[in-house]
Amino acid sequence: EDHLSLDETRAVTAHLWKNYSHVVSLLTETQLHRLIAETSVSTLPTATQDIGEDLPSERLYENGVPSDTCTLILSGKVMVLVGHDQFRSDVSSWCVLASGALENASYKPDFSAFVSSGPCRCIRITRNRFAAAVDASATERMGQTPEELPHDVLEVPPPGLDLGANMALGEPSRKAKLMTALMAVGSGGRKREAEDKVGSKLEVEEKVEAVT
């Protein structure tokens, strides 16, 4: 399976965080990054249209047909036909289609869409995978310590944060606990920021107590 590079993942995460905040507001930045990194990239050819057909048979979406998948276009072009009059518009890189499918179990697009200029490189996020990321984000915001988190939440650590040396088989070290607690109270999940906030021993301990 093809996946985005680290730089691409960061770019897509930043794009969604800034321009589609209403779509990803339930996710933490860490879980959004993880969701993008773990979603495989689809490469779709230009859709072919048979003689006598109004639309190609290979469609990303069909007006009124339920869908549980949101699509982010990375390259290529997609033709979108909207409404009863089938108003046509080409969309391309960085466009998000069917974001409502991520949260609405009865979502039906009010448009049809197909690849008009391929290959179209895109990532397609399903409702189930998005829901799992929402759950992981809720756990992260609650400030639970690493040993309390489900195993799958720990498989991909936040970018730039390496607590591996501090978390052997036994109880996590005091520094690891402090860093985790500081992440929970708003350090943004970055190791350098967390270390800058350690400062006073007493102040750090108060923050640890506040989230445990």
Image: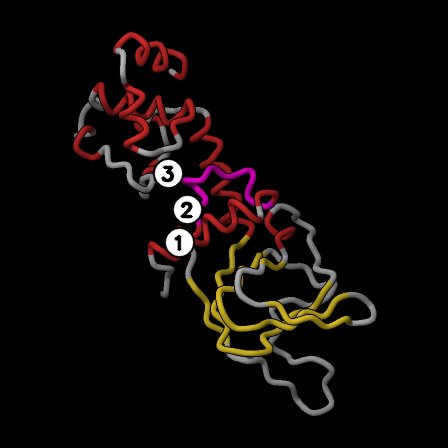
Residue type marked 2 = His
Q: CA distance from mark 3 to mark 1?
A: 18 Å
Bin the neighbour count of mark 1 within 10 Å (Cα to Cα): few under 14, some 14-19, many 20 and up: many
Residue type marked 3 = Val
First to last magenta residue range:
23-35
Which residue is at 45% across, 25% downward?
142
Q: Is residue 28 magenta?
A: yes
Say which residue label 1 marks. Answer: 9
Bin the neighbour count of mark 3 within 10 Å (Cα to Cα): few under 14, some 14-19, many 20 and up: some
Say which residue label 3 marks. Answer: 153
Q: Are marks 1 and 2 in contact (CB under 8 Å)?
A: yes
Apparent side of residue 46 relative to residue 82 in the rendered image (left or right): left
Sequence-wise first label, 1 or 2: 1
Q: Give the image quarter of residue 67.
A: bottom right
Kindly report the secondary structure that dominates the magenta region of the rendered protein. helix
Residue type marked 1 = Thr
Say which residue label 2 marks. Answer: 33
